[in-house]
Structures are given as structure tokens and as C-alpha cells.
Image: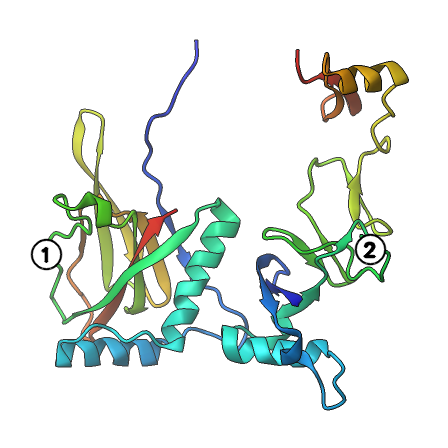
């Protein structure tokens, strides 16, 4: 089963459709994106070039099962197709964050959230607390929060 | 002190912007409306219409998180100097099967030839209304519980307005 994102001319993902593999095979039995696009134009009433194949198993430019990642992320409704870098990206979570093309993800100006300490992890495991970091756009830093508090 | 909003009236309007060379075939749609009125049969569900319907369902979901389920459609033709009667698309006696939203899409309406008048209440201020000019390829969406009229056609040509109703899921 293949997946294709339906995008508009501003590269906004409007929907994601599935396509039976047999509907995108060439005469040699090899799946071709262009054949799938043509099939979708005919049957889903949207121009072929605005159907972009996406991989259900790709997340942050890694394939869950160790395969070859395709276009950064599995496309979702509201995502954008970055045609320059050939990746799907989720909406920008905060104005100050920038796109990391390598991971097809947004990163904060100070990088990822700090690691939780051993004590915090054990408290999370025991269920007495639920420590996590939230990005604070005002202070441009990560705030440690206890979700149970 | 805190504020809670129990209800609101949301209204959407704009042009239907399709991909290049994939414009809504408004000529065909106006032909379909004319045909359905002539033979007194419902509009047939065509690929041309599906394109329009998908446009609304796709964009309302992605832009406003509104998941719309198509319920019904019909076309109206307004001769010069003709206006609509007062319309409301919900059935007060059958609210369960009534739509949530109404879209009026100007299949063919010369600029400046007509407007949609939507009536609403604002607390004790009853009978307020909003006029929205429509023209070719312009749409207005509003709650189906509101009364509205399509104003007199001031042009010397026929105006074609397609109504689409949707249920919100």
C-alpha cells in the first residue's frame, strides 16, 4: 500500500490518500510515483503533479523499520511540502524555531530539551510525578514541568 | 473572573482558488443547474461538482479544523430583477437531519449584480443583517440556522447560485 499526499499550489497538504501498489506499477512491475500520480489524477480528480508520495514509516527522516526514509516525514493534513528540500514538514510550533533539514524537524534556538535526571525518570516511572520540558517562547528556554502538579 | 463562549456565529467567504488549469467549470455547472431546473430533477453528481465539493471539505478541514460531510446541493437561477424569498436551510421539525452549514457559491453572477443578506440576532438586538457581495467564483458559508436572501439581480443576465449544505462531524 502506497500513500500520497494531496497538496495545493502553496504546497499545503490537504489530504493523504492510499493507493494500491498494483496501481502504480510500470510494465516491468516496478512501482513508479508518476504512474501513481496519474492514477490519482484520473480517479481522485486532482492534478497529478499535486500528488506527492509519502512514506507511512518515515519520521524525522528515519525509517522505522530500518529502510530508506522518504521525504522526511509521513505527510499529515496541514503539513507543508518543502519542494526545495523534498521533505514534508509539520507546522512550525514556535516562531523562533528553525527547520533542521537533516531531521526534517523544527528545532529551538537552544536545541532540544535537556535530558531528565535519573531521579526524575525514576519518579516518572513510579508514577509520583510526570516530569517533562515545555518550550517557553517568552524566555527562549525550556521549562521543567510536572504534569501531575 | 472568566469568560465562556457558549455559541458563536461563524461566517466564511472568499474565492475558490483551484490549481492552474483546474478551475471549476462554471459554464458546465450553470448548464447543469439549468438542466436540473428544466427537467425538475436534482443536480447530478458530476466530477465537476465533486471538485468543488472536495475543495470545500479539504480546505475547511485544513484551515479551520471543520470536518464537513456533504448533505445536499441544488442550484438556483435568478432572472434580471429577481430575488430569492427568505430562505433557511434547516428544518425546525427535523433538526437531526438538518445541515449545520450552508454554502452559497456564485457559479455565474456579474460583479455588483447581487449580494447575500444574512440575518442574525445579537443578544437582544434582533434582526441584524450582513450583506455580502458575491460574483463569479465567490462563496459564502454560514450556519444553516440563519435566514438569508439572495438580493435582486441587477444585471441583465441570469445569475446562477449553487447551494451546498454540510453537516459538521
Percent position of residue B104, x then y: 29, 59
Q: Residue at x 31, y 47 (%)?
A: B142
Please tell me how crowded label 1 is: few (under 14), some (14-19), or many (20+) other residues with Cα within 10 Å. Answer: few
B42 relative to A110 in the view: left or right:
left
Circle 2: element type: loop
Q: Residue at x 14, y 81 (%)?
A: B39
Please tell me how crowded label 2 is: few (under 14), some (14-19), or many (20+) other residues with Cα within 10 Å. Answer: few
Chain at tag 2? A
Q: Residue at x 60, y 58 (%)?
A: A13
Percent position of residue A107, x then y: 81, 39
Q: Which mark is residue B40?
A: none
Percent position of residue B165, x then y: 29, 56
Is residue B146 among the parts visible in the rendering?
no
Circle 1: element type: loop
Q: Which mark is residue A65?
A: 2
Eye-nearest disc, 1 or 2: 2
Residue wearing tag 1 = B85
Instruction: Tell me how far mark 1 sits from mark 2, CA to CA.
Output: 62 Å
To the question of a shared chain for discs 1 and 2, the answer is no
State the image quarter where residue B19 is shown: bottom right
Q: Nearer the viewer, residue B161 or A69?
A: A69
Chain at tag 1? B
Amino acid at each position: 500500500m502506497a500513500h500520497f499526499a494531496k497538496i495545493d499550489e502553496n504546497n499545503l497538504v490537504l489530504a493523504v490518500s492510499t493507493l494500491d501498489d498494483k496501481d502504480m506499477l510500470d510494465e516491468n512491475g516496478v512501482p513508479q510515483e508518476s504512474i501513481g500520480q496519474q492514477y490519482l489524477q484520473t480517479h481522485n480528480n486532482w492534478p497529478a503533479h499535486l500528488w506527492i508520495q509519502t512514506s507511512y514509516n518515515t519520521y524525522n527522516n528515519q525509517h522505522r523499520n530500518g529502510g530508506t526514509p522518504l521525504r522526511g516525514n509521513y505527510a499529515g493534513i496541514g503539513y507543508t511540502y518543502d519542494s526545495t528540500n523534498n521533505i514534508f514538514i509539520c507546522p512550525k510550533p514556535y516562531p523562533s524555531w528553525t527547520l533542521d533539514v537533516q531531521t526534517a524537524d523544527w528545532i529551538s534556538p537552544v536545541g532540544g530539551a535537556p535530558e531528565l535526571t535519573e531521579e526524575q525518570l525514576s519518579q516518572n516511572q513510579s508514577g509520583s510525578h510526570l516530569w517533562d520540558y515545555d518550550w517557553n517562547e517568552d524566555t527562549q528556554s525550556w521549562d521543567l514541568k510536572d504534569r501531575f502538579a | 473572573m472568566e469568560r465562556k463562549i457558549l455559541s458563536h456565529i461563524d461566517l466564511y467567504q472568499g474565492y475558490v482558488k483551484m490549481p492552474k488549469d483546474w478551475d471549476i467549470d462554471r459554464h458546465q455547472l450553470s448548464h447543469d443547474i439549468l438542466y436540473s431546473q428544466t427537467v425538475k430533477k436534482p443536480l447530478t453528481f458530476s466530477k465537476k461538482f465533486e471538485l468543488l465539493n472536495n475543495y470545500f471539505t479539504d480546505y475547511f478541514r485544513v484551515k479551520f479544523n471543520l470536518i464537513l460531510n456533504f448533505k445536499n446541493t441544488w442550484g438556483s437561477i435568478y432572472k434580471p430583477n429577481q430575488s430569492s424569498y427568505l430562505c433557511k436551510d434547516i428544518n425546525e421539525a427535523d433538526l437531526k437531519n438538518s445541515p449545520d452549514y450552508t454554502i452559497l457559491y456564485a457559479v455565474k453572477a456579474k460583479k455588483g449584480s447581487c449580494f447575500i443578506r444574512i440575518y442574525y440576532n445579537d443578544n437582544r438586538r434582533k434582526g441584524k443583517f450582513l450583506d455580502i457581495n458575491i460574483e463569479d467564483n465567490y462563496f459564502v458559508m454560514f450556519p444553516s440556522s440563519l435566514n438569508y436572501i439572495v438580493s435582486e439581480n441587477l444585471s441583465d443576465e441570469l445569475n446562477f447560485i449553487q447551494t451546498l449544505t454540510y453537516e459538521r462531524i
